[in-house]
Amino acid sequence: MKLSGDQVNFSDEFSPFHLDVLKEIANIGAGHAATSLSKLLDNKIDMCVPSVKLAGFNEVMELAGGAETEVVSVMFRLEGDAPGLMFFILSPQQADQFVTRMTGRKSYGQNLNGRDEIGESALRELGNIVVGSYLSALSDLTHVEVQLSVPFLTIDMAGAILSSALVELACDSDRALVIETSLVETGPANSSIDGCFFFLPDADSSAILLKSLGVLGSR
């Protein structure tokens, strides 16, 4: 990965300490997302981030269920100080579960080849809340300004989705930042939704993020 100015490699320079900091930021964002989702679903939502880690793309594929596994992806282009792509990925079954709770409509997964605008809108809103809350917390604590594009909803094989992202970024890095997410709805519903979101930075974003965490300044 070629960077202008300070040479920083996304794969090598994020230490366990820095990932712990990012996990704390993600948990703050999860708290904000839980509040928004609780209002949306009119029920208490607990949301946590079990782990934040760097993963090679083979591992990313496995976390998404396997390269040939069909997934529901909400993708955002990130603009501003740290451009790149971010994906929130769910299994079709988990997407079904959320759409049912959100709209009362069932079997979204059985309509993958058709158009279900209400279900699609619900999933885009879920992606907006989860990804937007995380990035808002990141911006507040690091002063890295990032703007989200409109969400792009895709239902396809995990390998096809992530491979096309690498082509779009012309990315040389072999890793992505993986943020696991767990949403638990308490009360009568008593259901959970587990997903992952993956951040694929462009060439300059890793340097900017490391600087924002004080990595370069401490050397």
Image (cartoon, grey):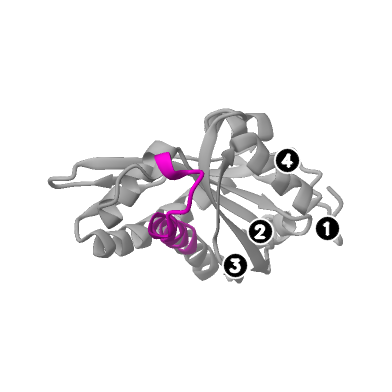
How far apart marks 2 and 1 lie (CA) works out to 12 Å
> Residue 142, can we see it?
yes
Q: Are marks 1 and 3 in contact (CB under 8 Å)?
A: no
Distance from disc 1 to disc 4, alpha carbons, whole Å, reads 14 Å
Q: Nearer the viewer, residue 195 or 219?
A: 195
Dot 1, crowdedness within 10 Å: few (<14), some or many (≥20)?
A: few
The numbered mark, 3 or 4, whose residue comes first in the sequence reads 4
Q: Nearer the viewer, residue 193 or 144?
A: 193
Q: What distance separates the C-alpha of mark 1 from that of mark 3?
A: 28 Å
Using the rendered view, name the quadrant where residue 44 is placed. bottom left
Q: Is residue 194 visible?
A: no
Q: Position of residue 59 (x, y in %)?
A: 61, 30
* Distance CA(mark 2)–CA(mark 4): 13 Å
Which portion, as a residue range, is magenta? 110-132
What residue is disc 3 on? Answer: 149
Residue depth check, mark 3 versus mark 2: number of the one nearer the observer: 3
Q: Where does the image place residue 135, in percent across and percent down from the top left?
A: 52, 62
Instruction: Give the residue pinned by disc 2.
Output: 209
Q: Is residue 127 magenta?
A: yes
| Residue that label 1 marks | 6
Residue 48 percent coordinates (x, y)? 36, 47
Specify few, some or many for label 4: CA neighbours under 10 Å numbering under 14, 14-19, or 20 or more.
few
Nearer the N terminus, badge 2 or badge 4? 4
Q: Is residue 50 above or below residue 131?
A: above
Magenta stretch: includes residue 171: no
**Residue 219 sits in quarter:** bottom right
| x 28%, y 63%: residue | 40
Residue at 69%, 62% (x, y): give it: 83
Q: In the rendered view, does 157 fall on the left or right side of 30?
A: right
Residue 12 numbered tag: 4
* Label 3 – label 2 distance at C-alpha: 19 Å
Which three-letter amino acid code belongs to the residue tagged 1?
Answer: Asp
